[in-house]
């Protein structure tokens, strides 16, 4: 990852002159800011009372729209911190659900600037989370992927921001102590115990049965048979906590990572293109690593099976020519965007008329009909979840207006979206 560190030397020296510390140097303040960045994986930004940047350490990946939205935040934070002492910090969350902490800088009890730490998140990123941000800030639906990518790069503090704020205040206000790293030897390692499979009651027959169950499970993934894959998952999942003694959560995470890889390979054999599988695999890899309970991992493993099976059913391109494979993958990845036949043909480098005719011949429907059916199928899924309004769902799946969405929904399903929602 590329990190950006910007320092305004003149303002930096001004800041050093006004911070109320016993002993401080430019290197010390800079090292404190880097310590915050490295410890919490959060950007650090120091500004004076005129909001001029003194120091900025970041990975330089923030969309410009978020940088612009932050300008008003400085005013709000200054109003909150001007009357506060150097033991205080302010927690601020903007309309994009990005959170920041600000610690004031004083000279003779007068506010002279602040050290800003953020952005970070206080809740998990989901599709519903991002769509709410888009709606609240009146953004186009094309912001879905850029925002999703950015949010997933941020630190998640959950319910711990206040404790983190206390750490920041103590770090910034007090002189930093140089630490020493020492090690000690684990005496138990002097007598390593060689682990044998039979120690865990895994004899040859049990191992053979497990691998047969695993083979059957992967076959169901490859076929997109969700119901049987779910049953098979229970049959071959075992207890492998012994692989990471004393840390069963880590052991289960490792097993979940392996399952993610096996599921991806099985779905690839089922005809799903690598680009789409990569998106699924990356999503679950991040969710697995951020899981904090065994139950959460169990749910993720079932969700993985469901999504990979759905991918085989919905996105398999087996049996099609290379031209139509590319078109199908493009639509599968971009159907939520305002795409049309000309745009697809241009991006793939084909003649529009040629591509449209070949698509209809192989897929047995026009590209527009295929796109609309993809959008309606996704809308039906979102309606089943019951988390979004019909209007929001229509926008999320790629329709430009509510009335048009309702018209196409009825044409495809034979009922209105309201009727479908009421039947769930």
Image (tube, helix red, strand yellow):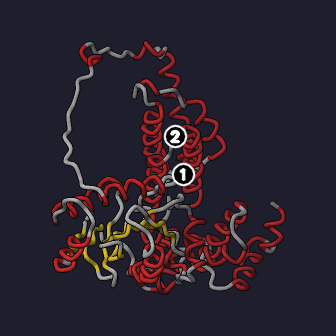
Q: Which mark is residue 349?
A: none
Which quadrant of the view contains residue 311?
Answer: bottom right
Q: Which mark is residue 308?
A: 1
Spatial distance from mark 1 to mark 2, Cα to Cα? 11 Å
Q: Is residue 149 visible?
A: no
Residue 102 x/y as whole percent: 40, 68
Instruction: Give whichever of 154, 240 is nearer the camera.
Output: 154
Question: What residue sits 77% from the left and 73% below the top?
Answer: 417
The local crowd at label 2, few if under 14, some if 14 to 19, many if 20 or more residues have their Cα within 10 Å, is many
Q: Is residue 4 visible?
A: yes
Residue to which mark 2 is pinned? 218
Residue 150 against residue 52 in the figure, above or below: above
Q: Secondary structure at mark 2?
A: helix
Which quadrant of the view contains residue 213?
Answer: top right
Residue 337 x/y as whole percent: 53, 78
Residue 341 x/y as whole percent: 52, 83
Q: In which quadrant will I find the C terminus? A: bottom right
Question: What residue sits 70% from the left and 78% below the top?
Answer: 391
Q: In which quadrant will I find the N terminus? A: bottom left
Marker count (numbered): 2
Instruction: Give whichever of 95, 311 is nearer the camera.
Output: 95
Question: What residue sits 51% from the left and 26% below the top?
Answer: 239
Q: Is residue 191 found left or right of 389 in the rendered image? A: left
Q: Is residue 159 found left or right of 399 in the rendered image? A: left
* Closer to viewer: mark 1 or mark 2: 1
Residue 255 x/y as whole percent: 45, 36
Q: Secondary structure at mark 1?
A: helix
The local crowd at label 1, few if under 14, some if 14 to 19, many if 20 or more residues have their Cα within 10 Å, is many
Question: What residue sits 28% from the left and 15% below the top?
Answer: 192
Q: Earlier in the sequence, mark 1 or mark 2?
A: 2
Q: Is residue 261 found left or right of 378 in the rendered image? A: left
């Amino acid at each position: 990852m590329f990190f950006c560190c910007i320092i305004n030397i003149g303002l930096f020296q001004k800041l050093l002159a006004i911070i109320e510390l016993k002993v401080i140097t430019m290197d010390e303040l800079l090292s404190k800011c880097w310590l915050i960045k490295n410890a919490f994986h959060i950007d650090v930004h120091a500004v004076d009372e005129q909001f001029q940047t003194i120091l900025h350490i970041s990975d330089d990946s923030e969309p410009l729209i978020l940088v612009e939205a932050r300008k008003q935040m400085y005013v709000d934070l200054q109003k909150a911190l001007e009357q506060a002492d150097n033991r205080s910090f302010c927690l601020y969350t903007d309309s994009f659900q990005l959170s920041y902490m600000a610690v004031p800088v004083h000279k003779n009890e007068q506010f002279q600037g602040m050290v800003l730490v953020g952005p970070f998140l206080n809740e998990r990123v989901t599709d519903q989370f991002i769509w709410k941000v888009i709606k609240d800030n009146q953004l186009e639906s094309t912001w879905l992927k850029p925002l999703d990518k950015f949010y997933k790069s941020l630190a998640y503090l959950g319910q711990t921001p206040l404790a983190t704020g206390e750490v920041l205040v103590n770090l910034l206000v007090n002189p930093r102590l140089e630490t020493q790293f020492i090690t000690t030897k684990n005496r138990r390692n002097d007598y390593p115990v060689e682990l044998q499979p039979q120690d865990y009651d895994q004899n040859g027959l049990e191992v053979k049965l497990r691998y047969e169950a695993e083979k059957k499970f992967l076959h169901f993934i490859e076929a997109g048979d969700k119901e049987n894959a779910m049953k098979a998952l229970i049959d071959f999942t075992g207890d492998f906590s012994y692989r990471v003694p004393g840390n069963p959560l880590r052991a289960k995470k490792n097993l979940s990572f392996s399952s993610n890889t096996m599921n991806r390979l099985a779905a690839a054999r089922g005809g799903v293109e690598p680009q789409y599988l990569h998106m699924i695999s990356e999503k679950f890899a991040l969710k697995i690593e951020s899981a904090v309970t065994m139950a959460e991992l169990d749910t993720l493993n079932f969700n993985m099976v469901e999504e990979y099976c759905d991918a085989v059913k919905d996105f398999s391109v087996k049996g099609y020519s290379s031209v139509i494979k590319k078109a199908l993958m493009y639509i599968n990845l971009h159907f939520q965007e305002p795409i049309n036949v000309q745009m697809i043909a241009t991006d793939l480098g084909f003649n529009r008329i040629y591509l449209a005719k070949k698509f209809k011949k192989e897929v047995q429907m026009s590209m527009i009909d295929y796109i609309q059916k993809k959008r309606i199928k996704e809308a039906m899924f979102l309606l089943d979840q019951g988390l979004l309004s019909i209007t929001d769902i229509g926008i999320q799946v790629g329709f430009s207006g509510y009335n048009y969405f309702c018209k196409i929904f009825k044409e495809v399903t034979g009922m209105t979206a309201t009727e479908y929602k009421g039947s769930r």
